[in-house]
Image: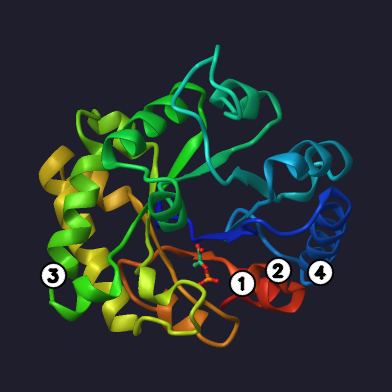
Amino acid sequence: SNSRTPLMVGNWKLNLDHHQAIQLVQKLAWTLGDAKHDYDAVEVVVSPSFTSLRSVQTLVDGDKLGLRYAAQDISAQEKGAYTGEVSAAQLSALGVSYAIIGHSERRQYHAESDALVNAKILAALGADITPIVCVGEALEVRQASEHVAFTLAQVDGALAGLSAEQVAALVIAYEPVWAIGTGEVATPEDAQEIAEAIRARVGELVGADVAAGLRILYGGSVKGDNVAQIMAKPDVDGTLVGGASLVLEQFAAIAGFD
Ligand code: PEP
């Protein structure tokens, strides 16, 4: 069987307070339960704000429901005088399974560099949290036809110094910035082109076996009605979903894409 279990991640960004987060998680779990969703066949992850992670984990037991949780960011620091940061150990203690790292909004508004992304990946791995490492080019880069080189340079920077074992324990999400929150979705061919190139680069970096098992997600205006075409591409193993993950029917359709 394919070791690359499809992975659908809902990134709620800066939306919903903890009451609303509990409601949406409960409704999602009920909807997927009614649909007899097989969580082993398609993994489903939601990423609420830090303030909601404790609430959803305590009141809606993800383990029992089959849902898993992701943090939207993670500190590169272990502990100490880092005001406002949330550590890998703190997230791990809450039962958080994944951390989104290097999302384009963090790169853009918080000046996150590839070096910081790399450090955050190491922090997450050290606490057994699976990094979802985001890469992807802005519109000008695509218009200049430099999207492949740009994205692979981000992959190189993010994975610098990582062992094969460490790379095997993470997920990469290709999210072209021009497709995020814009309603502009990359074509399945665009998504495949970059996913294939990322897999090849990871093969060069740490070996073909790790590359073959690596899960690569596509993100950028994924909806219930375009997810199947994207998932049909051989190197796309899942999706990272912003806007549509806040709409119950949309995200349930994405989770049950086939
Ligand atoms: C995202 O921010 O990860 C994302 C893909 O957003 P949207 O689905 O809204 O384009």
Q: Which residue is mark 1?
A: 243
Q: CA distance from mark 3 to mark 2?
A: 32 Å
Q: Which residue is mark 4?
A: 31
Comparing 160 with 227, the one in front is: 160
Compared with 117, 33 (above or below) is below
Could you tell whether 24 is left or right of 177 in the image?
right
Q: CA distance from mark 4 to mark 2?
A: 14 Å
Residue that extends furthest to the bottom in the rendered view of this protein: 225
Q: Secondary structure at mark 2?
A: helix
For disc 4, the neighbor class at 10 Å (few under 14, some 14 to 19, many from 20) is some
Comparing 69 with 42, the one in front is: 69
Q: Which residue is mark 2?
A: 246
For disc 2, the neighbor class at 10 Å (few under 14, some 14 to 19, many from 20) is some
Q: Is residue 256 visible?
A: no
Q: Nearer the viewer, mark 3 or mark 2?
A: 3
Residue 210 on image: x %, y %: 25, 43
Does label 4 or label 3 sit earlier along the sequence?
4
Compared with 69, 41 (above or below) is below
For disc 1, the neighbor class at 10 Å (few under 14, some 14 to 19, many from 20) is many
Q: CA distance from mark 1 to mark 3?
A: 27 Å
Residue 115 on image: x %, y %: 27, 35
CB-based contact (under 8 Å), mark 2 and mark 1: yes
CB-based contact (under 8 Å), mark 4 and mark 1: no
For disc 3, the neighbor class at 10 Å (few under 14, some 14 to 19, many from 20) is few
Q: CA distance from mark 4 to mark 1?
A: 19 Å
Amino acid type at circle 4 is: Thr
